[in-house]
Image: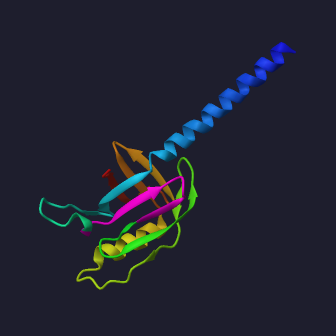
Amino acid sequence: MRILSSLAALIFLLSCSGAGKIQDEKQRLNGSWAVVSLGDKELSVTIGDDATALPQLEIKVGEMSYKGSDGCNRLMGGLIELDEKNIRFGVAAGTQMMCPDMEIPDLFNRSLSEVRSWEIRKNQLHLFNEQGEELMQLKKID
């Protein structure tokens, strides 16, 4: 009987540690990220430029939500799916400002709706479509 109790406790601890590892991995998504590449376009900001012109995301894993900017308009929405490798961003609510150049904001919004998976490498978030093609890279900014 004592062996069964010990075995049950060990199994419980092992199962909890695996779940914690997955949760820890997702927690790495928390925070603010600036887009550094969008498809084959490299994005950069030089000193003195307006960093808010870059698309940015703030991901809140515990709330299953996101907010940010597409480089022109503010946006916010919910995460439809999130696990250790999959992520789907829900439809965003946002402002409707008129900006002189909508190429990057439009590309960002299209790409965000196609995101299906994620990976963090060297403090950069890589977002991929359903076919595994990289849609964007983001750099942690907080």
Query: In this picture, is 101 found above or below 28?
Result: below
Q: Nearer the viewer, residue 136 or 94?
A: 94
Looking at the image, residue 83 lies above or below residue 96: above
Instruction: Identify the residue at the far right of this view.
Output: 1
Query: Relative to 31, does residue 1 appear above or below in the rendering?
Result: above
Q: In which quarter of the view is residue 3 placed?
A: top right
Judge by depth and name the residue closer to the eye, 79 or 116: 79
Percent position (x, y) of residue 121? 37, 44
Left or right: where 101 falls relative to 110: left
Q: Is residue 51 visible?
A: yes
Q: Is residue 61 magenta?
A: yes
Q: Residue at x 67, y 27 (%)?
A: 13
Q: Is residue 133 visible?
A: no
Q: How is the image coloured?
A: rainbow
Q: Residue furthest top?
A: 2
* Residue visible at 30% across and 71% down in the picture: 71
Residue 123 position in % (x across, y down): 34, 44
Looking at the rendered structure, the number of numbered marks drawn on it comes to: 0
Residue at the extreme front of the image, as rendered: 63
Q: Quadrant of the N terminus?
A: top right
Q: Is residue 19 left or right of residue 129?
A: right
- Measuring from the top left, give residue 129's x and y in whole percent: 47, 62
Q: Is residue 20 left or right of residue 72?
A: right
- Residue 61: image location, x then y, percent: 51, 53
List the single residue furthest toward the left.
Answer: 48
Magenta part of the chain: 53-67
Please give the name of the residue rendered at 50% of the width and 55% of the height, measured from the top-left corner: 117
Is 59 inside the magenta-drawn segment? yes
